[in-house]
Image (tube, grey):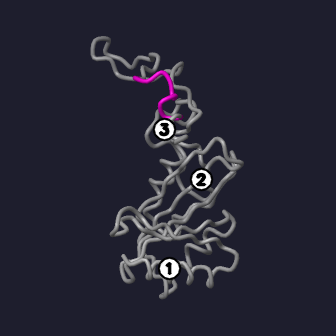
Amino acid sequence: MSLEKLERLAEAVKSRFAGLEAELFTGFGEKHLGAAVTVHVDPDNLLAVLTILRDDPGFNFHQMIDLAGVHYPERAKPLEVVYHLLSMRHNHRIRIKVALDEGQPIPSIIGVWSCADWYEREAFDLFGILFTGHPDLRRLLNDYDFEGHPLRKDFPLSGNYELRYSEEQGRIIREPTQLQRESREYYNARDER
């Protein structure tokens, strides 16, 4: 995708949505693989912005590719929800980012893209992000009695329990979680580079 096209998209977003910050990510390498426009949106405006991006023929983002939760414990707003959208007609990609305080809810976008159902449940389960208006917000990957949210960077690496079925005992047993890495020093040192 050409950078000129992305620059035009960033300008169109800025002119259509007054006050929104749109930045250009040029991607990787000479061919700009993964290049996209990133827009930072307030949770209160999220549904309106996404609906316009989907319905306006100038944008035409009819496909939501992905929704992901992110945890940045050092930030004032430590949680972030990232939406990746694709316009097949214009061959544009756009990334919508919404920063959240701990426990702050964000509106569900199932009414805009129904495929967001499982993505939102995953972000709730693994990061503790609350989606208001979601019809079935419950754990997706972890047990219902699991405590905490395992993809947060402050999640303890040891001391928790897991449930599993034991063939030898013929029942579900509870045992301490066994993780390979006891320390996050390697990851923290890598992030500081």
Front: mark 1 or 2: 1
Instruction: Residue 192: give x, y in percent of width and height.
Output: 55, 40
Label 1 SS? helix
Give the foreground label among 2 and 3.
Answer: 3
Residue that appears at 45% across and 43% down: 140
Q: Secondary structure at mark 2?
A: strand
SS at badge 3? helix
Residue 75, percent across and down?
67, 47
Q: Disc 2 designates what residue?
A: 80
Left or right, 48 with respect to 1, comes to right
Task: Answer with mark 3 or mark 1, whichever residue precedes in sequence.
Answer: 1
For marks 1 and 2 on the same chain, the one whose residue lies earlier in the sequence:
1
Give the extent of the magenta segment: 180-188
Q: Position of residue 84 (x, y in %)?
A: 46, 64
Which quarter of the figure is the N terminus placed in? bottom left
Locate residue 9, reporting x and y percent. 50, 80
Kind of residue at badge 3: Arg
Residue extending farthest left: 167
Number of the label disc, if any, that sits on residue 7: 1
Q: Residue at x 36, y 17 (%)?
A: 171
